[in-house]
Image: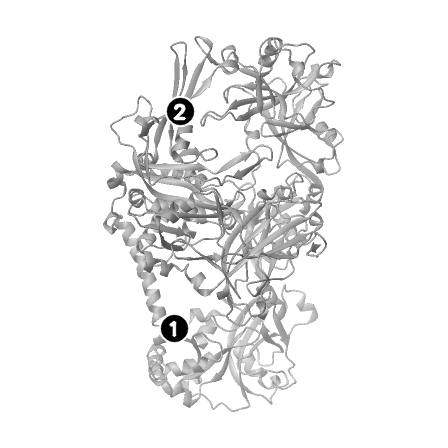
Amino acid sequence: MASTSKNPGDTEMTSLLPPRGKGYQRSDAPVVTGNDGDNQLPEYPQTFYWKVVNFSRLNVKKLYSDDFIAGGYKWRILLFPKGKNSEYLSMYLGAADSAALPSGWVIHAHFSLSVVNQTQNDYSIRKETQHRFCSTASEWGFKPFMSLVELYDPDKGYLVGDMCTIEAEVAVLSDSEFMSYDSIHSKKATNFVGLKNQGATCYLNSLLQTFYHIPYFRKAVYNMPTTENDMPLALQNLFYKLQFSGKSVATRELTKSFGWDSSDVFMQHDVHELNTVLCEKLEGKMKGTIVEGTIQQLFEGHNMSYIECINVDYKSTCTDKFNDIQLLVKGCSDVYASFDKYVEVDYLDGDNKYSSELYGLQDAKKGVLFIDFPPVLQLHLKRFEYDSMRGNDSKINDPYEFPLQLDLDRENGKYLSPEADRTVRNLYTLHSVLAHGGSVTGGHYYAFIRPTLSNQWYKFNDERVTKVDAKRALEDQYGGQGKLPQTNPGYEFQISENSNAYLLVYIRESDKEKIMCTVEQKDIGEHLRARFEIDHEDEEQKKKDESEANLYTVIKVARDEDIRQQIGKDIYFDLVDHEKVKCFRIQRETLFSAFKEDIKKEFCVPVQFQRYWLWAKRQNHTYRPDRPLTRLEEAQTVGQLRKVSSKFHNAELKLFLEVELGPELMLLSPPEKAKDNILLFFKGYDPEKEDMRYVGRLFVKGISNPMQILSKLNAMAGYAPDQEIELYEEIKFEPSVMCEIINKNSTFRSNELEDGDIVCFQKSLTAESRQQFRYPDVPSFLEYVHNRQVVHFRSLDKPKEQGFCLELSRINTYDEVVGRIARQLELNDPSKIRLTSHNCLSQQPKPQPIKYRGLDYLVNMLFHNNKISDILYYEVLDIPLPEIQGLKPFKVAFHHATKDEVVIHMISLPKQSNVDDVMKNLKTKVELSHPHAELRLLKVFRHKIYKILPTTEKIENINDRYWTLRAEEIPEEEKNIGPHDRLVHVYHFNKEAAQNQMKIQNFGEPFLLIIREKETLAELKPRIQKKLQVPDEDFAKWKFAFVTSDCPEYLEDLDILLSRFQQRENVLHAWEQYLGLEHSDGVSKRTHAAHQSLHRREKPLRICD
């Protein structure tokens, strides 16, 4: 149940502005004007809160909110609480009164949707976009809004008391505001065009614009070898259109080459992550070509990490490469302060001394220096940081300045290593600023770019490109605190500037001429230019045709020959497919009589033997010849006749050419069309051959009855003259077939037949003979044709391989479909077949299979993204599907007690089972160290043990998506624990050194260990070393610490460990207090990929090969 009640504490609709009356006009809305003079969004969008109670118990596929008003229009939120066939909550904004709005209505709106975090508002998930709402697109939003796993996690704060709070902010834009985003306007005003946003691809658009405006990079892309439909070709095509097109460019071809589907383009990712992944893919694609090494030449630099002893002559160094430099924002005022922090020396002394191989523990200093910087320097500003207390990221909106010119040789090259080439001048000029507006859970990316490094900056905001001044590109992107302009007296708000720079791109002055080269058409490969020119010519021809459309009329002429050729082969319903008949493009001023001369030449039918009928689209969506043209109409021009045709809702002039044939196919003049004459078309059906064909047409008198033409129909069909036949009227076929028997003894008028109607007939059958045929009569055959579907079945474990085909009906039930598959596979039990639908966009199986009888009909199984697929995937199970659905499946990582081995086991048990049942099941699958070994199950997350699951806990309460479930043998020593002994948590850790931050980073496999009464660290070390099988040389470098709330207190060999741990009754929540093993990541053998694949809130970004 959804609630928007006005109980205390609940708000149905909250607006930051006083409510407006019916006379409210959009032109009165306050508008924030930036320095570039472009209209921004209305200052105060209308806000609506929707409290959905009993959320987890909702048993509906979709749910609408109450209507609310914004900008003078009614809106509502559409929610899919269980997702739209995915693991993500789906949410949309819709025009609530779309059916009542006038024809051709359009509303331009910028809006955001949020799921409010009720425990900490900063972690609310918010996504925003803009859309042109109209009758054909009255709802818009986000199919993958947020992970259902995260939504339903009780610790996250999105569901509190089983209530979910949804927030919508809607700003209705005027036509002028919205049209300012138009790409043609951008081209005229700036000479640049934007990129279309597919849903949430602003991060992709901003990065592509940045790369495009690095000419050296663009030229290299143009010179990459390509194959059809691959990523380099799509990127070349996109760059070419950005360079030469006059309107905004679509990215659909590029994202398709990435292997992305609709869920990917509606899932916003981090632009820095995309930068890394895209450059890696391009680097791989460039290998072995003339542009190999371009990515390294442009973006790659090198740094040196060092540790140097102070009192002895020892220094350890390590060289690494980078494509971008990640700079701290928190605690730093500007870029130079971040670089100072980056190379800041960290002293290792006291309890934190460095253990050198030759000299043991020594006072030392460590840090990072740069060997060289790249020609194109990318600075990633760390605006997002991990909040260890909440397990989420948070955004840092602190003020942070960056210069137009960046001198990295400052203060005598303080950032450079001794090995650096000091002859290279590291003076950089700012090329682009990629900014992010919003919070960590959602927002918008856009780019400020100087395409020629002149004083003129441009803002690239998806399709919209505008000129801006330097202040807008620099100072306004520093972040910090600001005030909303006081356009409304009495309203003043102090706000955080959550729109700020996120990625900076600098060009080295000494490389500027090379990097910022000119890219002309001659720089593009000839084969590419030819391909693009063909595309351009096709587009220009299309424009020309559209511009000249008012000068010409398209006439489509159907004849008996077309009907005879198509019925029973291409089509069964109606009479003809007009896309397959002869088409003429005639100037509108041409007399129709002149057009008839063209017909004479084309079909060899003299003018006097031609008669033309207008086609009309009926209310039941069928197309039929409606009436013949009058002599007056035939005397008009083609253009005038087209206007007559438009009354019948025809986009083109569609005609039926009636030609009468006498004996020996002699041409006859068309008979006079009396008022009582009816033109009928006839189809014959053969149930034995399951075949239908067109047999001809006749004029009949309305007052006559079908009995009077039976002999003519038998002759037309080739039947015996006295053959008894049944007649049916074909009325319609969409959305369902309607075919009714005709009373042969009633008049044609009584049977409600009129010009253009279709009569299907067949031989009369006895009740006994009807049993011989699958489809004994016309209605059953047409029903079969309407619903028949050839389905290609593929094995789920071999989704790319062709399997087998079955001809089915779209209205086959679930049981009928699996029954047919079982017969094909010679399987006795159809319930052991599980089906999975096909994703038409990704061309892959959907992630979730179809539940047993979860979909009623075949058509439901094939439907995806408003398309009907012809592919289904199947798998044969060991046990019936209904039984499986009563089971709870989950993954358990079993850690062997004596072998360095971790094995993932899939376990499925009845949902009523408990942890003890899991352990019993697991014992049958794993190798134990001894027959009487006992097992336990742990919940592990981020390299810490969060819970030892009680044996009585129900498995239906366990979520293996969020946690890693680890099973292990209980060591014998734990079974004999003394009254004063302690079971403590032991975790591996190191301290982040890249930025000289004393931040704990856990890694590897955590474990539990008994600490004996009065046991010292020196006594414990051998047990740890034996358990982890660490070589002496490595183990000597390890440090040991008592860690509380991520603060390490280093231990000496003589320290008694038990005294450091607070006495507790249990260790179920002891992850904040543990024995820490400090060493470099990778030394411990007991690591496994199973624990690195923790479920993330969103799908990882990937670009397919």
Rendered residue at 53%/69% (across/down): 572
| Disc 2 secondary structure class | strand
Label number found at residue 555: none
Dot 2 crowding, Cα within 10 Å, few <14, some 14–19, many 20+: many
In front: mark 2 or mark 1? 2
Q: CA distance from mark 2 to mark 1?
A: 74 Å
| Residue 170 against residue 159 in the figure, above or below | below
Residue 749's spot in the image, x, y percent?
A: 61, 86
**In this picture, residue 12 sits left or right of residue 143:** right
Q: Quadrant of the C terminus?
A: top left
Its colouring scheme is one colour
Residue 259 visible, this angle: no
| Disc 1 secondary structure class | strand
**In this picture, residue 519 sits left or right of residue 344:** left
Residue 548 visible, this angle: yes
The one of 351 and 440 positioned closer to us in this rendering? 351
Question: The disc labelled 2 sits on which kind of residue?
Answer: Val
Q: Quadrant of the N terminus?
A: bottom right
Number of numbered labels in the structure image: 2
Residue 905's spot in the image, x, y percent?
A: 63, 30
Task: Choose the circle earlier in sequence order: 2 or 1.
Answer: 2
| Residue 730 against residue 991 in the figure, above or below | below
Residue 208's spot in the image, x, y percent?
A: 38, 46
The residue furthest front is: 490
Q: Quadrant of residue 881?
A: top right
Rendered residue at 68%/17% (across/down): 971
Q: Which residue does the numbered mark 1 point to in the structure image?
A: 583
Residue 488's spot in the image, x, y percent?
A: 52, 58
Label number found at residue 368: 2
Question: The disc labelled 1 sits on which kind of residue?
Answer: Cys
